[in-house]
Image (tube, helix red, strand yellow):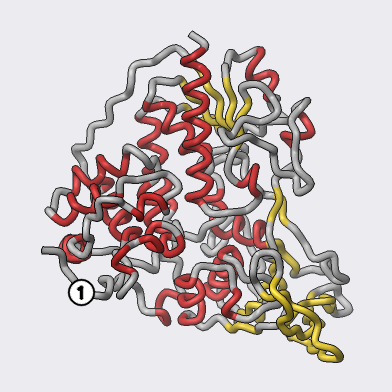
Amino acid sequence: MPNMRLTKNPMPSQDANVRNKNFLEVALGYTEEMAIDEAQRCLNCKNKPCVEGCPVKINIPEFIAHVAKGDFAAAYEVIAKSSSLPAVCGRVCPQEVQCESKCVRGIKGEAVAIGRLERFVADWHNAQENVVINKPESNGHKVAIIGSGPSGLTCAGDLAKKGYEVTVFEALHVAGGVLVYGIPEFRLPKSIVQKEIETLKALGVKIETNMVIGKVLSIDELMAEYGFEAVFIGSGAGLPRFMNIPGENLNGVFSANEFLTRINLMKAYKEDSATPVYRAKKVCVVGGGNVAMDAARCAKRLGSDVTIVYRRTEAELPARREEVEHAAEEGINFKMLTNPVEILGDEQGWVKGMYCQEMELGEPDEKGRRKPVPKEGAMCTVECDAVIMSIGTSPNPLIKSTTEGLMVNSRGGIIVNEDGLTSRNAVYAGGDAVTGAATVILAMGAGKTAASAIDEKLQGAK
């Protein structure tokens, strides 16, 4: 009989007043007993609605059934058929609006903790020392992947499992893309990312770092001179946006991209880091998404008093509810219905505050959220000595500018069809390079789609 308890097993975690002073992982993971107990809450529905909510279509009831019986190895095999990054997804995927939102148990209680179980299974697998990975026999076809973020790694993994000779070209000195430069250590330890990458290497995936495609080599050169029969562009959306308000050039104004890259990739939170970061007394983070929460929580750990400034109310925050709750628990302040119109500076050119317009909610916008409108005559000043802008990112224009015939939309995203094919023959794209900044799991889904289309095209070319 299923375990009919209405609530999930809570996730063990560090105490908020301890974790807000360190960069160790916040969530500690399920024990074997907790995982089995949680898995037994699954009804193993025949129509599998949770699978429909998963962008990479993991057979969720099947892997959970194995966990319920304590067969964690079999559970991992099920997940690995669909996902190349299970330990990552179990930590950062927004399950609450995807697979868990479709869970039948969520109708009269809490959904099964699918994401926590995926994390448990992946961590259990990665802790085993006797894992043997069999490299598939080469099928003779070569594919190039641009970018080693979630879409690129997923595409590479799916193709490698089919015997393709895959080379991933990464612009930075470390593979992992946004998983290593964008997501903080306390949410996603970099050792987890590297473990997943090592698994892909064992399958035969080659990774070339410090390779800025568009500068070192072009896509045309990869195909004409290096023999790659198809290319997948998964270069992400690393170009930060700003508000174009007065004062954005003052000392102490950062994009969230720069701030997080310095901390996550370059370890600026360590006292002996070769790449420092400004440790301000009072920091304002402008924005309300997951990146804003990450930036705010990092600044808090550096000793700053941190305030998130957002133009809507807390109910409209686009960040995951869990991340908002964690930020509040850790002492982050929230100033809602507030929109900066100018960043104020002192005589030395450093930030000293923000002049803001108070807002109120008007009619819903095209996405259904009530649109923020200025509250007439209501202005305020927020004191701070650093501002982190976290209002979104766009795809870097380098690849478009160096690839003839590659069509993009008005936001700079590469235009693709339903299979991920661009306007160039045998050139595919997916993830943030297409959609703009989105979630890890949606980028992975795009990588899977493109891998399937590449396989169909190249096998049909025989």
* In the image, residue 445 above or below residue 161: below
The reply to whether residue 266 is in sight is no
Is residue 371 positioned above or below 50 on the image? below
**Is residue 41 shown above or below 233?**
below
Q: Which quarter of the figure is the N terminus placed in?
A: bottom left
Residue under label 1, please give it.
5
Foreground of the two, 105 or 452: 105
- Say which element carries label 1: loop
Residue 85, by quadrant, is top left
User: Is 188 positioned to the left or the right of 34 in the image?
Assistant: right
Does the image show residue 447? yes
Q: Percent from the top left, x then y, of residue 274? A: 59, 54
Q: Position of residue 338 (x, y in %)?
A: 73, 82
Query: Splitting the image into 4 quarters, where does residue 39 fall?
Result: bottom left
- Measured as percent of width and height from the top left, residue 10 is found at 29, 73
Left or right, 310 with reference to 230: right
